[in-house]
Image (spheres, rainbow, N blue to C red):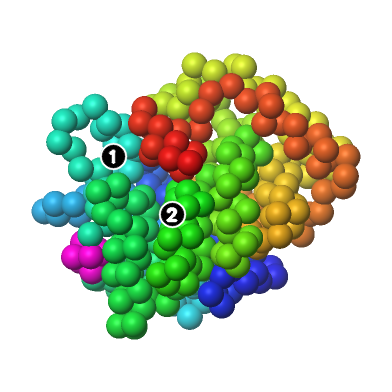
């Protein structure tokens, strides 16, 4: 697989791997299978492994973010650290999904970005990962009670201390990105971007292109929905089934899958490959590097997704796929609070 330069001199494989898929949030898997999938990703040329302190289950006796996805990734790093561009995140104080849905609970503090917490979170992640340095350290969600300049300033101190190499931000607005980038170089913004989630194109993507910041789309396959391989029963009990798109509007959004499937059939590709190839084309048109991070619990799916890095869509396919977003019913937000995602704060 070819490599891509994000921002701040950070170079990764053209596709990354989203390790959240190996946690119970999407059904989960056993550790041996999960580790085999991570190794398969490296074998297929994927170097960027994306995790977070909030993915997985709480560590025994821990009072804070989950942590066990980082300890799983640590087992990969023990043997293959030199082959990995390691990305992790901090800032969400509860469990992923639950933190977003706790909007109505009085006194719940879902995010933290104060300087003390930045330092503590980094040290905790390094311990769980068994690593000396994090290649790309993201603010997972900004803390509305703390100026982003303070949070990024503390993150920059981690770079100076040699604990972190590059900085990233997740689900930030264009204004927040500019304010952060004025404090320290930002290598990447990670937000949801896909055929059916295109709100970031209004402001965030142009700001990234302007500042020389790379974009790392999470959920580039619509949490698996765009692949056409999921059933409603499969997602009913996890985070995917709780969204308005894949809950009440499951049937209505099958029209989206049908369009993607028709393009894939014409090109002799899979739905997933077409959806990922569209993101690469969207990045080229916007003038910025794009490194999607699809996740999966299957080594075969890793290989399938990786092949998308070499798929070039023709103009007919691009024209058809560009209109898919107009068919979508429901919001991409997993929370009742509109400000949980960047579009709600723009």
Q: Position of residue 212 (x, y in %)?
A: 60, 67
Q: Is residue 34 magenta?
A: no
Q: Nearer the viewer, residue 142 or 277?
A: 142
Q: Nearer the viewer, residue 202 or 159?
A: 202
Q: Nearer the viewer, residue 309 or 230?
A: 309
Q: Secondary structure at mark 1?
A: helix
Q: Is residue 64 visible?
A: yes
Residue at point 23%, 65% (across, down): 115
What numbered label is drawn on residue 2? Answer: none
Q: Left or right? Give the position of 126 relative to 252.
A: left
Circle 1 is placed at which residue position?
99
Q: Residues within 10 Å of mark 2 (few under 14, many from 20)?
A: many
Q: Residues within 10 Å of mark 1 (few under 14, many from 20)?
A: some
Considering the whole magenta stretch, tell me its main secondary structure. Answer: helix
Alpha carbons under labels 2 and 1: distance apart: 21 Å
Q: Is residue 117 magenta?
A: yes
Toward which corner of the image does residue 52 lie, by quadrant? Answer: bottom left
Above or below: residue 50 compared with residue 106: below
Circle 2 is placed at which residue position?
176
Q: Is residue 36 visible?
A: no
Residue occupying the far left of the picture: 61
Residue at point 42%, 77% (across, down): 165
Specify start and end residues of the magenta stretch as a single range: 115-121
Q: Left or right? Give the position of 254 relative to 53.
A: right
Residue at point 30%, 83% (across, down): 161
Q: Position of residue 249 (x, y in %)?
A: 54, 18
Disc nearest the viewer among 2 and 1 = 2
Q: Secondary structure at mark 2?
A: helix
């Amino acid at each position: 697989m070819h490599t891509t330069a994000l921002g701040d001199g950070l170079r990764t494989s053209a596709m990354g791997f989203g390790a959240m898929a190996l946690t119970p949030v999407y059904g989960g898997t056993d550790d041996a299978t999960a580790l085999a999938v991570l190794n398969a990703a490296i074998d297929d040329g994927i170097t960027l492994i994306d995790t977070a302190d909030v993915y997985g289950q709480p560590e025994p006796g821990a009072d804070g973010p989950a942590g066990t996805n980082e300890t799983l990734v640590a087992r990969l790093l023990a043997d293959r650290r030199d082959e990995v561009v390691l990305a992790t995140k901090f800032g969400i104080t509860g469990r992923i999904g639950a933190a977003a849905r706790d909007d109505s609970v009085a006194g719940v503090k879902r995010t933290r970005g104060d300087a003390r917490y930045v330092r503590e979170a980094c040290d905790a992640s390094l311990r769980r990962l068994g690593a000396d340095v994090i290649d790309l350290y993201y603010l997972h969600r900004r803390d509305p009670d703390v100026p982003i300049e303070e949070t990024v300033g503390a993150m920059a101190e981690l770079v100076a201390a040699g604990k972190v190499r590059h900085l990233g931000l997740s689900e930030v607005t264009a204004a927040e990105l500019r304010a952060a980038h004025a404090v320290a170089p930002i290598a990447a913004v990670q937000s949801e971007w896909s055929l059916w989630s295109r709100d970031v194109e209004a402001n965030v993507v142009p700001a990234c292109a302007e500042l020389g910041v790379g974009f790392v789309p999470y959920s580039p396959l619509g949490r698996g929905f765009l692949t056409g391989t999921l059933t409603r029963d499969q997602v009913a009990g996890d985070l995917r089934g709780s969204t308005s798109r894949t809950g009440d509007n499951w049937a209505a959004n099958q029209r989206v899958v049908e369009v993607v499937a028709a393009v894939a059939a014409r090109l002799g590709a899979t739905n997933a490959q077409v959806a990922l190839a569209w993101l690469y084309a969207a990045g080229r048109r916007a003038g910025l590097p794009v490194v999607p991070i699809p996740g999966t619990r299957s080594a075969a799916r890793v290989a399938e997704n990786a092949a998308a890095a070499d798929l070039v869509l023709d103009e007919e396919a691009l024209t058809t796929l560009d209109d898919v977003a107009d068919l979508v019913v429901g919001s991409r937000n997993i929370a009742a609070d509109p400000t949980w995602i960047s579009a709600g704060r723009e």
